[in-house]
Protein backbone atom coordinates (compact mmCIF):
# COMPACT_ATOMS: atom_id res chain seq x y z
CA UNK A 1 0.00 0.00 0.00
CA UNK A 2 1.24 3.44 -0.90
CA UNK A 3 2.46 5.45 2.08
CA UNK A 4 0.30 8.46 2.92
CA UNK A 5 1.98 11.85 2.53
CA UNK A 6 1.23 15.11 4.34
CA UNK A 7 -0.98 16.33 1.49
CA UNK A 8 -3.22 13.27 1.82
CA UNK A 9 -3.89 14.17 5.46
CA UNK A 10 -4.62 17.75 4.37
CA UNK A 11 -7.14 16.43 1.80
CA UNK A 12 -8.73 14.15 4.37
CA UNK A 13 -8.96 16.99 6.91
CA UNK A 14 -10.70 19.27 4.42
CA UNK A 15 -13.13 16.52 3.44
CA UNK A 16 -14.07 15.89 7.07
CA UNK A 17 -14.47 19.63 7.77
CA UNK A 18 -16.75 20.20 4.75
CA UNK A 19 -18.89 17.10 5.34
CA UNK A 20 -19.30 18.00 9.02
CA UNK A 21 -20.28 21.55 8.12
CA UNK A 22 -22.84 20.29 5.60
CA UNK A 23 -24.39 18.00 8.21
CA UNK A 24 -24.67 20.64 10.92
CA UNK A 25 -27.75 22.82 10.50
CA UNK A 26 -26.46 26.18 11.70
CA UNK A 27 -27.34 29.43 10.00
CA UNK A 28 -24.52 31.95 10.24
CA UNK A 29 -25.46 35.58 10.40
CA UNK A 30 -23.81 37.73 7.78
CA UNK A 31 -23.67 41.42 7.12
CA UNK A 32 -24.82 42.65 3.73
CA UNK A 33 -22.03 44.29 1.77
CA UNK A 34 -22.47 47.58 -0.08
CA UNK A 35 -22.05 45.92 -3.49
CA UNK A 36 -24.82 43.37 -2.87
CA UNK A 37 -27.04 46.13 -1.51
CA UNK A 38 -26.46 48.14 -4.70
CA UNK A 39 -27.50 45.22 -6.88
CA UNK A 40 -30.60 44.68 -4.76
CA UNK A 41 -31.49 48.37 -4.89
CA UNK A 42 -31.06 48.42 -8.67
CA UNK A 43 -33.56 45.60 -9.28
CA UNK A 44 -35.83 46.91 -6.53
CA UNK A 45 -35.94 50.43 -7.92
CA UNK A 46 -36.95 49.49 -11.48
CA UNK A 47 -40.61 50.19 -12.29
CA UNK A 48 -42.86 47.12 -12.09
CA UNK A 49 -43.06 45.33 -15.43
CA UNK A 50 -39.58 46.39 -16.57
CA UNK A 51 -38.01 44.07 -19.10
CA UNK A 52 -34.67 42.63 -17.96
CA UNK A 53 -32.40 40.46 -20.06
CA UNK A 54 -30.76 37.67 -18.03
CA UNK A 55 -27.78 36.05 -19.71
CA UNK A 56 -26.56 32.68 -18.45
CA UNK A 57 -22.89 32.99 -19.34
CA UNK A 58 -21.46 30.12 -17.35
CA UNK A 59 -20.35 26.53 -17.64
CA UNK A 60 -21.66 23.46 -15.87
CA UNK A 61 -18.66 23.32 -13.52
CA UNK A 62 -19.76 26.49 -11.72
CA UNK A 63 -23.36 25.39 -11.06
CA UNK A 64 -22.95 24.81 -7.28
CA UNK A 65 -21.84 28.43 -6.85
CA UNK A 66 -23.79 30.08 -9.66
CA UNK A 67 -27.16 28.44 -9.03
CA UNK A 68 -27.85 30.09 -5.62
CA UNK A 69 -26.83 33.44 -7.12
CA UNK A 70 -29.04 33.04 -10.19
CA UNK A 71 -32.01 31.86 -8.14
CA UNK A 72 -31.92 34.88 -5.81
CA UNK A 73 -31.69 37.33 -8.72
CA UNK A 74 -34.53 35.63 -10.62
CA UNK A 75 -36.68 35.44 -7.47
CA UNK A 76 -36.16 39.11 -6.76
CA UNK A 77 -36.98 40.11 -10.35
CA UNK A 78 -40.17 38.00 -10.44
CA UNK A 79 -41.17 39.15 -6.97
CA UNK A 80 -40.97 42.77 -8.16
CA UNK A 81 -43.11 41.96 -11.20
CA UNK A 82 -40.36 42.41 -13.79
CA UNK A 83 -40.47 40.53 -17.07
CA UNK A 84 -37.45 38.47 -18.06
CA UNK A 85 -35.85 37.53 -21.35
CA UNK A 86 -33.36 34.69 -20.90
CA UNK A 87 -30.43 34.11 -23.23
CA UNK A 88 -27.20 32.16 -23.02
CA UNK A 89 -23.88 32.93 -24.64
CA UNK A 90 -22.22 29.71 -23.53
CA UNK A 91 -23.69 26.42 -24.73
CA UNK A 92 -23.43 24.80 -21.31
CA UNK A 93 -25.42 27.55 -19.62
CA UNK A 94 -28.38 27.12 -21.97
CA UNK A 95 -30.14 24.15 -20.41
CA UNK A 96 -29.28 25.28 -16.89
CA UNK A 97 -30.68 28.76 -17.51
CA UNK A 98 -33.91 27.36 -18.93
CA UNK A 99 -34.41 25.09 -15.91
CA UNK A 100 -33.71 27.90 -13.42
CA UNK A 101 -36.09 30.31 -15.13
CA UNK A 102 -38.84 27.69 -15.31
CA UNK A 103 -38.30 26.76 -11.66
CA UNK A 104 -38.57 30.34 -10.37
CA UNK A 105 -41.43 31.21 -12.75
CA UNK A 106 -43.47 28.36 -11.23
CA UNK A 107 -42.77 29.66 -7.69
CA UNK A 108 -44.24 33.06 -8.59
CA UNK A 109 -47.02 31.82 -10.95
CA UNK A 110 -45.48 33.53 -13.94
CA UNK A 111 -46.74 32.78 -17.42
CA UNK A 112 -44.34 31.88 -20.22
CA UNK A 113 -44.61 34.32 -23.10
CA UNK A 114 -46.15 37.06 -20.95
CA UNK A 115 -43.76 37.29 -17.99
CA UNK A 116 -40.75 35.43 -19.32
CA UNK A 117 -39.31 34.10 -22.54
CA UNK A 118 -36.19 32.01 -22.94
CA UNK A 119 -34.43 32.63 -26.24
CA UNK A 120 -31.63 30.12 -25.68
CA UNK A 121 -28.11 29.96 -27.02
CA UNK A 122 -26.37 31.86 -29.76
CA UNK A 123 -22.77 30.96 -30.66
CA UNK A 124 -20.04 33.59 -31.02
CA UNK A 125 -20.79 35.77 -28.01
CA UNK A 126 -19.34 39.04 -29.28
CA UNK A 127 -21.29 38.71 -32.53
CA UNK A 128 -24.43 37.80 -30.59
CA UNK A 129 -24.13 40.79 -28.22
CA UNK A 130 -23.55 43.22 -31.10
CA UNK A 131 -26.29 41.65 -33.18
CA UNK A 132 -28.87 41.98 -30.38
CA UNK A 133 -28.01 45.66 -30.20
CA UNK A 134 -29.31 45.99 -33.75
CA UNK A 135 -32.17 43.49 -33.64
CA UNK A 136 -33.07 40.84 -31.07
CA UNK A 137 -35.70 39.15 -33.32
CA UNK A 138 -33.15 38.81 -36.13
CA UNK A 139 -30.59 37.36 -33.71
CA UNK A 140 -33.12 34.99 -32.13
CA UNK A 141 -35.94 34.40 -34.65
CA UNK A 142 -37.24 31.63 -32.34
CA UNK A 143 -37.28 30.95 -28.62
CA UNK A 144 -35.43 28.01 -27.01
CA UNK A 145 -38.28 25.63 -27.82
CA UNK A 146 -38.41 26.68 -31.47
CA UNK A 147 -41.51 28.88 -31.36
CA UNK A 148 -41.45 32.11 -33.39
CA UNK A 149 -40.38 35.36 -31.68
CA UNK A 150 -43.57 37.10 -32.79
CA UNK A 151 -45.74 34.62 -30.86
CA UNK A 152 -44.98 36.09 -27.44
CA UNK A 153 -46.74 39.20 -26.04
CA UNK A 154 -43.67 40.02 -23.92
CA UNK A 155 -41.55 40.45 -27.03
CA UNK A 156 -44.07 42.59 -28.96
CA UNK A 157 -42.33 45.79 -27.99
CA UNK A 158 -38.78 44.45 -27.72
CA UNK A 159 -36.64 45.19 -30.77
CA UNK A 160 -33.19 45.82 -29.27
CA UNK A 161 -31.42 47.01 -26.09
CA UNK A 162 -33.36 50.31 -26.20
CA UNK A 163 -36.42 48.33 -25.08
CA UNK A 164 -34.64 46.54 -22.25
CA UNK A 165 -34.13 48.12 -18.80
CA UNK A 166 -30.86 46.28 -18.27
CA UNK A 167 -28.79 43.18 -18.77
CA UNK A 168 -27.85 40.86 -15.91
CA UNK A 169 -24.93 38.63 -16.83
CA UNK A 170 -24.69 35.51 -14.67
CA UNK A 171 -21.13 34.42 -15.29
CA UNK A 172 -18.32 32.26 -14.00
CA UNK A 173 -15.70 33.71 -16.34
CA UNK A 174 -14.90 36.80 -18.32
CA UNK A 175 -18.02 36.92 -20.52
CA UNK A 176 -19.49 39.84 -18.59
CA UNK A 177 -16.55 41.88 -19.92
CA UNK A 178 -18.00 41.54 -23.44
CA UNK A 179 -21.40 42.76 -22.27
CA UNK A 180 -19.62 45.80 -20.82
CA UNK A 181 -17.36 46.40 -23.82
CA UNK A 182 -20.03 45.95 -26.49
CA UNK A 183 -23.59 46.22 -25.10
CA UNK A 184 -22.75 48.95 -22.58
CA UNK A 185 -20.12 50.87 -24.57
CA UNK A 186 -21.77 50.60 -28.00
CA UNK A 187 -25.49 50.67 -27.11
CA UNK A 188 -25.53 52.25 -23.63
CA UNK A 189 -27.49 49.48 -21.92
CA UNK A 190 -27.11 49.13 -18.14
CA UNK A 191 -25.07 46.03 -17.35
CA UNK A 192 -25.05 44.30 -13.96
CA UNK A 193 -23.53 40.96 -13.01
CA UNK A 194 -23.83 37.96 -10.72
CA UNK A 195 -20.45 36.27 -10.84
CA UNK A 196 -18.37 33.52 -9.27
CA UNK A 197 -16.33 34.83 -6.32
CA UNK A 198 -13.04 34.20 -8.09
CA UNK A 199 -14.02 36.65 -10.85
CA UNK A 200 -14.97 39.56 -8.60
CA UNK A 201 -11.59 41.29 -8.67
CA UNK A 202 -11.61 41.05 -12.48
CA UNK A 203 -14.73 43.22 -12.56
CA UNK A 204 -13.68 45.68 -9.84
CA UNK A 205 -12.18 48.14 -12.36
CA UNK A 206 -15.48 48.20 -14.27
CA UNK A 207 -17.42 48.81 -11.04
CA UNK A 208 -14.99 51.61 -10.20
CA UNK A 209 -15.48 53.23 -13.61
CA UNK A 210 -19.28 52.80 -13.49
CA UNK A 211 -19.33 50.70 -16.68
CA UNK A 212 -20.61 47.79 -14.63
CA UNK A 213 -23.50 49.22 -12.65
CA UNK A 214 -23.63 46.64 -9.86
CA UNK A 215 -22.26 43.21 -9.03
CA UNK A 216 -23.01 40.42 -6.61
CA UNK A 217 -20.52 37.63 -6.26
CA UNK A 218 -19.94 34.16 -4.92
CA UNK A 219 -21.78 32.08 -2.39
CA UNK A 220 -21.44 34.89 0.13
CA UNK A 221 -23.13 37.28 -2.31
CA UNK A 222 -25.98 34.78 -2.71
CA UNK A 223 -26.29 34.46 1.07
CA UNK A 224 -26.37 38.25 1.49
CA UNK A 225 -29.01 38.55 -1.24
CA UNK A 226 -31.12 35.83 0.40
CA UNK A 227 -30.93 37.82 3.63
CA UNK A 228 -32.15 40.95 1.84
CA UNK A 229 -35.00 39.00 0.26
CA UNK A 230 -35.77 37.41 3.65
CA UNK A 231 -35.80 33.93 2.13
CA UNK A 232 -33.87 30.75 2.80
CA UNK A 233 -31.71 29.20 0.16
CA UNK A 234 -28.61 27.27 -0.72
CA UNK A 235 -26.48 30.42 -0.39
CA UNK A 236 -26.98 30.72 3.37
CA UNK A 237 -26.94 26.94 3.81
CA UNK A 238 -23.59 26.71 2.03
CA UNK A 239 -21.94 29.53 3.99
CA UNK A 240 -21.06 27.29 6.94
CA UNK A 241 -19.25 24.86 4.62
CA UNK A 242 -17.46 27.72 2.86
CA UNK A 243 -16.53 29.42 6.14
CA UNK A 244 -15.25 26.11 7.58
CA UNK A 245 -13.15 25.48 4.47
CA UNK A 246 -11.74 29.02 4.64
CA UNK A 247 -10.86 28.62 8.33
CA UNK A 248 -9.24 25.26 7.53
CA UNK A 249 -7.11 26.84 4.78
CA UNK A 250 -6.12 29.67 7.15
CA UNK A 251 -5.07 27.12 9.77
CA UNK A 252 -3.08 25.21 7.13
CA UNK A 253 -1.29 28.41 6.10
CA UNK A 254 -0.43 29.16 9.74
CA UNK A 255 0.78 25.61 10.47
CA UNK A 256 2.83 25.58 7.25
CA UNK A 257 4.51 28.84 8.20
CA UNK A 258 5.18 27.79 11.80
CA UNK A 259 6.93 24.66 10.48
CA UNK A 260 8.83 26.75 7.93
CA UNK A 261 10.02 29.30 10.53
CA UNK A 262 11.00 26.53 12.98
CA UNK A 263 13.00 24.74 10.26
CA UNK A 264 14.71 27.98 9.24
CA UNK A 265 15.68 28.67 12.87
CA UNK A 266 16.94 25.16 13.30
CA UNK A 267 19.07 25.39 10.14
CA UNK A 268 20.50 28.81 11.06
CA UNK A 269 21.28 27.54 14.60
CA UNK A 270 23.03 24.40 13.32
CA UNK B 1 -0.37 33.92 -54.20
CA UNK B 2 -1.26 31.39 -51.48
CA UNK B 3 -0.35 34.01 -48.90
CA UNK B 4 -1.48 37.09 -50.76
CA UNK B 5 -5.16 36.10 -51.05
CA UNK B 6 -5.67 35.40 -47.31
CA UNK B 7 -3.87 38.68 -46.50
CA UNK B 8 -6.15 40.63 -48.86
CA UNK B 9 -9.29 38.92 -47.46
CA UNK B 10 -8.12 39.62 -43.91
CA UNK B 11 -7.38 43.30 -44.62
CA UNK B 12 -10.66 43.75 -46.46
CA UNK B 13 -12.77 42.24 -43.69
CA UNK B 14 -10.77 44.01 -40.98
CA UNK B 15 -11.32 47.45 -42.48
CA UNK B 16 -14.97 46.72 -43.40
CA UNK B 17 -15.88 45.51 -39.90
CA UNK B 18 -14.06 48.48 -38.36
CA UNK B 19 -16.07 50.93 -40.51
CA UNK B 20 -19.35 49.06 -39.95
CA UNK B 21 -18.86 49.10 -36.17
CA UNK B 22 -18.86 52.89 -36.06
CA UNK B 23 -21.26 53.65 -38.93
CA UNK B 24 -24.89 54.51 -38.21
CA UNK B 25 -25.99 54.33 -41.87
CA UNK B 26 -28.96 51.90 -42.33
CA UNK B 27 -27.15 49.96 -45.11
CA UNK B 28 -24.06 49.62 -42.93
CA UNK B 29 -26.20 48.43 -40.02
CA UNK B 30 -27.97 45.86 -42.18
CA UNK B 31 -24.66 44.57 -43.61
CA UNK B 32 -23.21 44.45 -40.10
CA UNK B 33 -26.18 42.40 -38.91
CA UNK B 34 -25.80 39.97 -41.83
CA UNK B 35 -22.10 39.49 -41.11
CA UNK B 36 -22.71 38.99 -37.38
CA UNK B 37 -25.65 36.62 -37.79
CA UNK B 38 -24.65 34.65 -40.88
CA UNK B 39 -20.93 34.75 -41.66
CA UNK B 40 -19.66 34.55 -38.06
CA UNK B 41 -21.87 31.51 -37.47
CA UNK B 42 -20.60 29.78 -40.64
CA UNK B 43 -16.98 30.39 -39.59
CA UNK B 44 -17.84 29.11 -36.10
CA UNK B 45 -19.32 25.91 -37.58
CA UNK B 46 -16.13 25.30 -39.57
CA UNK B 47 -13.88 25.87 -36.54
CA UNK B 48 -16.05 23.44 -34.57
CA UNK B 49 -15.64 20.85 -37.32
CA UNK B 50 -11.85 21.33 -37.33
CA UNK B 51 -11.83 20.87 -33.55
CA UNK B 52 -13.91 17.68 -33.65
CA UNK B 53 -11.84 16.12 -36.47
CA UNK B 54 -8.59 16.99 -34.70
CA UNK B 55 -9.88 15.62 -31.35
CA UNK B 56 -11.00 12.32 -32.92
CA UNK B 57 -7.75 11.89 -34.89
CA UNK B 58 -5.53 12.48 -31.85
CA UNK B 59 -7.56 10.13 -29.66
CA UNK B 60 -7.76 7.39 -32.31
CA UNK B 61 -3.96 7.48 -32.60
CA UNK B 62 -3.77 7.26 -28.80
CA UNK B 63 -6.07 4.21 -28.79
CA UNK B 64 -3.91 2.53 -31.45
CA UNK B 65 -0.78 3.16 -29.40
CA UNK B 66 -2.51 1.94 -26.24
CA UNK B 67 -2.02 5.20 -24.32
CA UNK B 68 -4.84 5.76 -21.78
CA UNK B 69 -6.99 3.54 -23.98
CA UNK B 70 -10.17 3.31 -21.78
CA UNK B 71 -10.33 7.09 -21.28
CA UNK B 72 -9.79 7.81 -24.96
CA UNK B 73 -12.49 5.34 -25.98
CA UNK B 74 -14.97 7.01 -23.60
CA UNK B 75 -14.02 10.43 -25.03
CA UNK B 76 -14.55 9.29 -28.63
CA UNK B 77 -17.84 7.61 -27.71
CA UNK B 78 -18.97 10.86 -26.11
CA UNK B 79 -18.17 12.84 -29.25
CA UNK B 80 -20.40 10.58 -31.34
CA UNK B 81 -23.11 9.40 -28.95
CA UNK B 82 -24.14 12.78 -27.51
CA UNK B 83 -24.69 14.49 -30.92
CA UNK B 84 -26.54 11.35 -32.04
CA UNK B 85 -28.92 11.66 -29.06
CA UNK B 86 -29.39 15.33 -29.96
CA UNK B 87 -30.11 14.52 -33.60
CA UNK B 88 -32.67 11.82 -32.81
CA UNK B 89 -34.54 13.29 -29.82
CA UNK B 90 -33.53 16.95 -29.86
CA UNK B 91 -31.78 18.94 -27.13
CA UNK B 92 -34.65 20.47 -25.22
CA UNK B 93 -36.78 19.72 -22.19
CA UNK B 94 -36.61 16.14 -21.02
CA UNK B 95 -34.67 14.77 -24.00
CA UNK B 96 -31.98 12.08 -23.49
CA UNK B 97 -29.41 14.73 -24.48
CA UNK B 98 -30.47 16.90 -21.51
CA UNK B 99 -30.46 13.84 -19.26
CA UNK B 100 -26.83 13.15 -20.22
CA UNK B 101 -25.99 16.83 -19.73
CA UNK B 102 -27.65 17.16 -16.31
CA UNK B 103 -26.73 13.77 -14.89
CA UNK B 104 -23.28 13.17 -16.35
CA UNK B 105 -21.66 16.35 -17.60
CA UNK B 106 -22.79 18.77 -14.85
CA UNK B 107 -21.81 16.51 -11.89
CA UNK B 108 -18.51 15.54 -13.54
CA UNK B 109 -17.50 19.13 -14.25
CA UNK B 110 -18.62 20.30 -10.82
CA UNK B 111 -16.61 17.48 -9.23
CA UNK B 112 -13.44 18.34 -11.13
CA UNK B 113 -13.92 22.02 -10.27
CA UNK B 114 -14.52 21.17 -6.60
CA UNK B 115 -11.22 19.28 -6.47
CA UNK B 116 -9.56 22.68 -6.69
CA UNK B 117 -10.47 23.29 -3.04
CA UNK B 118 -8.35 20.29 -2.03
CA UNK B 119 -5.38 21.43 -4.08
CA UNK B 120 -5.71 24.95 -2.67
CA UNK B 121 -5.69 23.53 0.87
CA UNK B 122 -2.63 21.42 0.10
CA UNK B 123 -0.85 24.31 -1.63
CA UNK B 124 -1.63 26.65 1.27
CA UNK B 125 0.05 24.20 3.65
CA UNK B 126 3.06 23.37 1.51
CA UNK B 127 3.78 26.46 -0.54
CA UNK B 128 2.28 29.62 0.93
CA UNK B 129 5.31 30.67 2.99
CA UNK B 130 6.46 34.05 4.29
CA UNK B 131 9.85 33.76 2.59
CA UNK B 132 10.29 37.49 1.92
CA UNK B 133 8.64 40.83 2.66
CA UNK B 134 6.67 40.65 -0.62
CA UNK B 135 5.54 37.09 0.08
CA UNK B 136 4.47 38.12 3.59
CA UNK B 137 2.39 41.03 2.22
CA UNK B 138 0.73 38.64 -0.24
CA UNK B 139 0.12 36.15 2.56
CA UNK B 140 -1.49 38.75 4.83
CA UNK B 141 -3.68 40.05 1.96
CA UNK B 142 -4.79 36.48 1.18
CA UNK B 143 -5.66 35.83 4.83
CA UNK B 144 -7.70 39.03 5.02
CA UNK B 145 -9.58 38.16 1.83
CA UNK B 146 -10.26 34.60 3.03
CA UNK B 147 -11.62 35.85 6.36
CA UNK B 148 -13.72 38.60 4.76
CA UNK B 149 -15.37 36.23 2.25
CA UNK B 150 -16.51 33.89 5.03
CA UNK B 151 -18.87 34.62 7.90
CA UNK B 152 -16.18 34.96 10.56
CA UNK B 153 -14.93 38.30 9.21
CA UNK B 154 -18.07 40.04 10.47
CA UNK B 155 -17.80 38.31 13.85
CA UNK B 156 -14.11 39.06 14.52
CA UNK B 157 -14.12 42.76 13.65
CA UNK B 158 -15.96 45.20 11.39
CA UNK B 159 -12.61 46.46 10.14
CA UNK B 160 -11.71 43.18 8.39
CA UNK B 161 -14.26 43.52 5.56
CA UNK B 162 -13.27 47.18 5.29
CA UNK B 163 -9.59 46.30 4.92
CA UNK B 164 -10.52 43.62 2.35
CA UNK B 165 -12.52 46.22 0.40
CA UNK B 166 -9.50 48.55 0.53
CA UNK B 167 -7.23 45.79 -0.84
CA UNK B 168 -9.70 45.19 -3.71
CA UNK B 169 -10.32 48.88 -4.38
CA UNK B 170 -6.73 50.13 -4.44
CA UNK B 171 -3.74 47.75 -4.81
CA UNK B 172 -5.69 45.02 -6.62
CA UNK B 173 -7.73 47.35 -8.82
CA UNK B 174 -4.75 49.47 -9.86
CA UNK B 175 -2.85 46.35 -10.92
CA UNK B 176 -5.92 45.07 -12.78
CA UNK B 177 -6.38 48.40 -14.54
CA UNK B 178 -2.74 48.46 -15.62
CA UNK B 179 -3.07 44.93 -17.03
CA UNK B 180 -6.36 45.77 -18.79
CA UNK B 181 -4.93 48.90 -20.40
CA UNK B 182 -1.87 46.92 -21.47
CA UNK B 183 -4.06 44.17 -22.98
CA UNK B 184 -6.18 46.79 -24.76
CA UNK B 185 -3.20 48.53 -26.31
CA UNK B 186 -1.63 45.19 -27.22
CA UNK B 187 -4.84 43.97 -28.89
CA UNK B 188 -5.16 47.22 -30.83
CA UNK B 189 -1.56 47.04 -32.05
CA UNK B 190 -1.79 43.36 -32.98
CA UNK B 191 -5.10 43.89 -34.83
CA UNK B 192 -3.61 46.77 -36.83
CA UNK B 193 -0.51 44.71 -37.62
CA UNK B 194 -2.70 41.82 -38.85
CA UNK B 195 -4.94 44.11 -40.96
CA UNK B 196 -1.98 45.93 -42.50
CA UNK B 197 -0.17 42.65 -43.12
CA UNK B 198 2.90 43.18 -40.92
CA UNK B 199 1.89 40.35 -38.58
CA UNK B 200 1.96 37.12 -40.56
CA UNK B 201 2.29 34.39 -37.94
CA UNK B 202 -1.41 33.51 -38.35
CA UNK B 203 -0.53 32.36 -41.88
CA UNK B 204 1.70 29.70 -40.41
CA UNK B 205 5.04 31.51 -40.56
CA UNK B 206 6.78 34.84 -40.93
CA UNK B 207 8.01 34.55 -44.53
Image (tube, coloured by chain):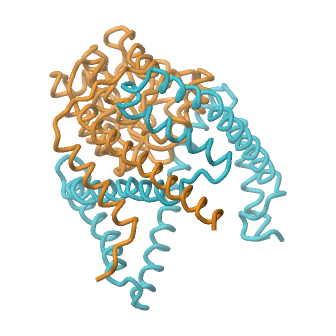
Chain colours: A orange, B cyan
Residue A164 visible (yes or no): no
- Residue at image position (67%, 26%) is B25
Q: Nearer the viewer, residue B63 or B50?
A: B63
Q: Nearer the viewer, residue A131 or B188?
A: B188
List the single residue furthest toward the front: A269
Estimate the x, y position of residue A99 in percent, counting from the top left.
23, 40
Residue A2 visible (yes or no): yes
* For residue B88, above or below residue A150: below
Q: Choose top left, top right, bottom left or bottom right for residue A152.
A: top left
Image-based side of B92 in relation to B63, left or right: left
- Residue at image position (35%, 54%) is B114
Estimate the x, y position of residue B154 in percent, counting from the top left.
39, 25
Estimate the x, y position of residue B116 in percent, counting from the top left.
41, 56
**Numbered label tally:** 0
The N terminus of chain B: image quadrant = bottom right
Estimate the x, y position of residue A92 in percent, counting from the top left.
36, 50
Q: Choose top left, top right, bottom left or bottom right for residue A49.
A: top left
The C terminus of chain B: image quadrant = bottom right
Q: Nearer the viewer, residue B85 or B154?
A: B154
* For residue A46, above or below residue A150: above
Q: Nearer the viewer, residue A266 or A45?
A: A266
- Residue at image position (26%, 41%) is A145
* For residue B8, above or below residue B76: above
Q: Choose top left, top right, bottom left or bottom right for residue A39.
A: top left
- Residue at image position (35%, 31%) is B151
* For residue B74, above or below residue B160: below
Amino acid sequence: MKKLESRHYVFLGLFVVIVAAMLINVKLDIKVSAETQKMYDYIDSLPQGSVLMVSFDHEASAVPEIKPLALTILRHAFKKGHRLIGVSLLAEGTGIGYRLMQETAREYDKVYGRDLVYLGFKPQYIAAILSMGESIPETFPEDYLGRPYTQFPLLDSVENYDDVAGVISIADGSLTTHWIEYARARYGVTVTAAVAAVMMTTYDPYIGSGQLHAMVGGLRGAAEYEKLLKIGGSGRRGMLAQTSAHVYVIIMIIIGNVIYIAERKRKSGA
Amino acid sequence: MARKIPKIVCALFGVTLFVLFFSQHPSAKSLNLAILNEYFQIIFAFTLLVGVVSFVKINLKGVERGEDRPYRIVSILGVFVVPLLALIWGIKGDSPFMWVFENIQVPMQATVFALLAFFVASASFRGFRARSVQATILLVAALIMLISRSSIGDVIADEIPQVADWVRSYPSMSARRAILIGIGLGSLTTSLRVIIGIERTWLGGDK
